[in-house]
Amino acid sequence: MSAAEQPKDRAEVERGQFARLRALLAALESSNAFYAKKLSSLGKIVSLEDFSARAPFTAKSELIEDQRAHPPFGSNLTFPLERYTRYHQTSASTGAPLRWLDTEESWAWMLSNWDRVYDAAGVTRADRIFFAFSFGPFIGFWTAYESGTRRGCLCIPGGGMSSAARLRAIVDNAATVLCCTPTYALRLAGAASEDPAAPVDLARSKIRRIIVAGEPGGSIPGVRKRIEEVWGSARVCDHHGMTEVGPVSYECPSTPGRLHIIDSSYYAEVIDPNTGTVVPAGQTGELVLTTLGRTGSPLVRYRTGDLVRRGPPQACACGQFDFKLEGGILGRADDMVLVRGVNVYPAAIEELVREFAEAVEYRVELFSERNMSELRIQIEPVPGCADAAGLARKIEERLKAALTLRVPVKAVPCGSLPRFEMKAKRWVRLDKP
């Protein structure tokens, strides 16, 4: 977006959103079977506030049921199937996978959203971008890859490669930008010294930006610090998106750990997960999104399940009026665990464990004991750790101080915990203690 296109205030942002929302609703009323039925009683919308007050939410369970009833792609399609050229599906981390189709127009809209991510990260056509993901049906960094090529960057695919091979490709091709999950950024750094006969010298790496997505870690201070320490001069730039909605946010170039919703493409709300009412800025709630440009496969007031805290509506230090998420994605509404009266979120455990550089990986085990939820943690120390048991005790003490909760922590042998490329699955529920 050029300086001339920048909105002058929040009111101008919302006027543009309302115009795009009305155009979207008009298109869905005549052509989209799923939303024509769902929004049939909505009538004329006179403002964004009116929309938030009267339009129904869309839940992921509805979309899954719709695809079961109308296989294989469901009825949330605004155009004939012949118009659709892209296929992806969700990672199924919270249930059955959703199949998602895009027209060329909707795909181009998503590429333009990635332009905002790249602009905020300072990526130029002189950069060489390495994409450390599988390039399977999960949308991952597909849009980032194509947006990068359109920008004029040399884009290097890293699918079908081992971690060691990816590291060598990053160094040998002088890549300057790395796109991956926060977990995999740490995994790649750890893999640099796994083969003593052929270590990879990260000091030779030209990586200056690491754009992360797929997990909350990019906006967690402890995780950011760890990644930037092991990658030397690189700066972490967070971003988040979903298969169903596309690339949603970019990290503020002035305030690390703050995400901006791309307001020209989304209408965002933050609601109380229990009551569905919109909560004011500064309070934590669930992020709800309406896609304003993905007309071919739209979502209206989609409950993402992501917990966020909206920042003040005033202009940011970077000059943008976009909807701000303080601390990025704080967690998932369905991930919170009540342990002996204490609310425990995965992101909180992640931040606390990552304070300890000697802990290379961890796993959280959930189980029930006397009809109460309990958890314990396994930590894997770095190779050559002199006192693994002492490290476990330190982490246990840190967790107790931060959570006012005793969580047993045990050190396990090096290499015994699983490694992840995309979304990490460190929380495991056990049938028995």
Image (spheres, rainbow, N blue to C red):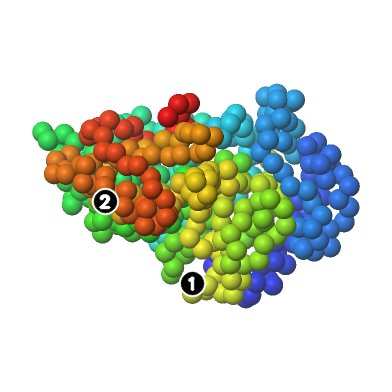
The residue lying toward the viewer, choosing from 341 and 195, is 341
Q: Which numbered marker is on residue 302?
A: none
Question: Is 71 on the left or on the right of 423, as rendered?
Answer: right
Disc 2 is placed on an element classified as: helix
Q: Which mark is first along the chain, 1 or 2?
A: 1
Could you tell me which residue is drawn at 16 percent across and 44 percent down? Answer: 387
Q: Classify mark 2: residues with Cα within 10 Å, few (<14), some (14-19) or many (20+).
A: some
Name the residue that disc number 2 marks: 394
**Circles 2 and 1 in contact, beta carbons < 8 Å:** no
Instruction: State the image coordinates of residue 72 (x, y, percent, origin top left).
Output: 67, 24
Could you tell me which residue is drawn at 79 percent across and 52 percent down? Answer: 55
Could you tell me which residue is drawn at 68 percent across and 71 percent down? Answer: 12
Disc 1 is placed on an element classified as: loop
Instruction: State the image coordinates of residue 207 (x, y, percent, origin top left).
Output: 29, 52
Give the answer, above or below, for where 24 lies relative to 164: below
The residue lying toward the viewer, choosing from 277 and 79, is 277
Q: Which numbered marker is on residue 318?
A: 1
Could you tell me which residue is drawn at 72 percent across and 36 percent down? Answer: 62
Give the answer, above or below, for where 325 lies relative to 131: below
Amino acid type of the residue tagged 2 in the rendering: Lys
Q: CA separation, marks 2 and 1? A: 39 Å
Amino acid type of the residue tagged 1 in the rendering: Cys
Identify the residue at the far left of this view: 197
Give the number of the mark in front: 2 or 1: 2
Q: Is residue 164 visible?
A: no
